[in-house]
Amino acid sequence: MIAKGTLVKKEFSVTSLNEFTDLIDALRGHWKFSPDDVCKPWFRGQQRKHWELVPSIVRIGAFDRETEDNIREEFATRAPALSRFEPLPTNDWDLYFLMQHYSVPTRLLDWTDSPSIALYFAVRDNPGHYDSAVWMLDPYELNRLVINRSEVISPSAQGVSVRDAKRVKPWLRERWSRASIPDAPLAIFPTHIARRISSQRACFTIHGSEELGFAQFTRRSASVLKKIVLPGRWVADIRMSLERIGIDDTTIFPDLEGLGRALATSYRDLKKKLPHAEVFVQLRPSRLHRSGVGVFAIRPIPKGRKIFAGENEEVSWIKKDSIPKSGPIRKMYDEFSIIDGDYYGCPTSFNRLTPAWFMNESRKPNARFDENYDFYAIRAIANGEEITVDFSASR
């Protein structure tokens, strides 16, 4: 049972599908939605709780009128030859919705009137390493504050009144128009021009001229937005609970690609390995490298076994002349890089050093590496033995 006094808060935390559903029901009642309302609360799932409510055109750093008009112009010019739509929409709004559908940067932000779909978007690609969030929006209240009308308009729908179309027109001016765009975001209904828009029960807000247009509402008004945090440790359980009631990629992407993703996600969760699986080593003070560390076996490693299964294998190649010639930075490159002529192979960030980067060199090694810089035991390695490699040996 959720105490009524707590519903005025702006942020909540849940650890299960049942808790999430109970909270949504309580918040709907708190916001006093009428059964006759065409539009109920809207929801948006985000993989990380700290992400701002900003559209893709902000995220790629292209949030200016000229760049947006260039993107719209190029899409309108090139899309007809590539489109499955016959004919391609000519209405500015429908073309803009189609751009969003195909991941073109726009000022649109995706929402859905299904809390379960939003919850799935929040957890579907989160391996549990961070907290996710579902945002809950009252679109009526947002529009009341922005255009003084407690209604949500579908700007390109057949039969939309001239007066309503004029109210939302300032948020999507004709390309190259010099007319201003309002500051705040607005809630709008899309025309269901594509199957996924319908299957995801999509709704949109469109940003105005402010990059952080929702900031004013997240800071001061719990009557427009609520944030529901999903702690990382519970993400996998929530995802499997959703799958048990039929919410997976096939639900929101009703095609063969969606089926493939749904099967991959389901079996990945079922077969998830524990963090210590296939871990054979640990860092300890080295006998070979005075005052340094080395890589030591913590259990027997059979001959031919890959030693660092599952580690981050990304290598960034840096030209030698772009590295300082001396000092601690150069020393770090010299000690933790694969040196190949004028290039240094190193982690994409030295903050991501894994045990493999601490391997010490020996002329009598017990490990080797191949052309992919994967390390293998060249003989049986005993528990407690330091693992070494001859970096000068040919691969």
Image (cartoon, rainbow, N blue to C red):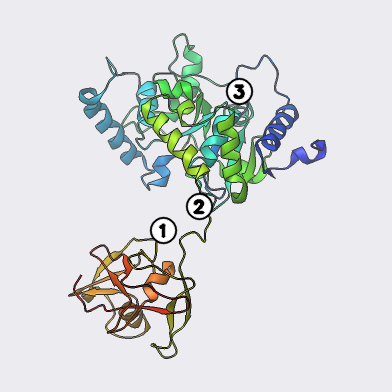
Q: Which mark is residue 310?
A: 1
Residue 150 horizontal side relative to residue 184, left or right: right
Residue 101 versus residue 382 in the image, above or below: above
The percent coordinates of residue 321 (x first, y second) are: 21, 76
Observer-nearest residue: 92 or 173?
92
Residue 382, by quadrant, is: bottom left
Q: Nearer the viewer, residue 195 or 324?
A: 195
Q: Earlier in the sequence, mark 1 or mark 3?
A: 3
Query: Where is residue 337 drawn, in percent x and y?
Result: 31, 74
Relative depth, front residue between 367 and 187 = 367
Q: Position of residue 336 (x, y in %)?
A: 34, 76
Q: Is residue 289 above or below residue 75?
A: below
CA neighbours of label 1 inside 10 A, class few (<14), some (14 to 19), many (20+): few
Is there a contact, CB below 8 Å, between mark 1 and mark 3? no
Label 1 – label 2 distance at C-alpha: 11 Å
Residue at point 73%, 25% (across, down): 32
Asked where in the image residue 85 lies, by quadrant, the reply is top left
- Screen quadrant of the N terminus: top right
Q: Which mark is residue 273?
A: 2
The kind of secondary structure element at disc 2 is loop
User: In the rendered view, does 275 fall on the left or right side of 64?
Assistant: right
Q: Give the alpha-carbon distance from disc 1 to disc 3, as whole Å.
A: 55 Å
Q: Which mark is residue 138?
A: none
Label 1 SS: loop
Q: Which residue is mark 3?
A: 149
The local secondary structure at tag 3 comes to loop
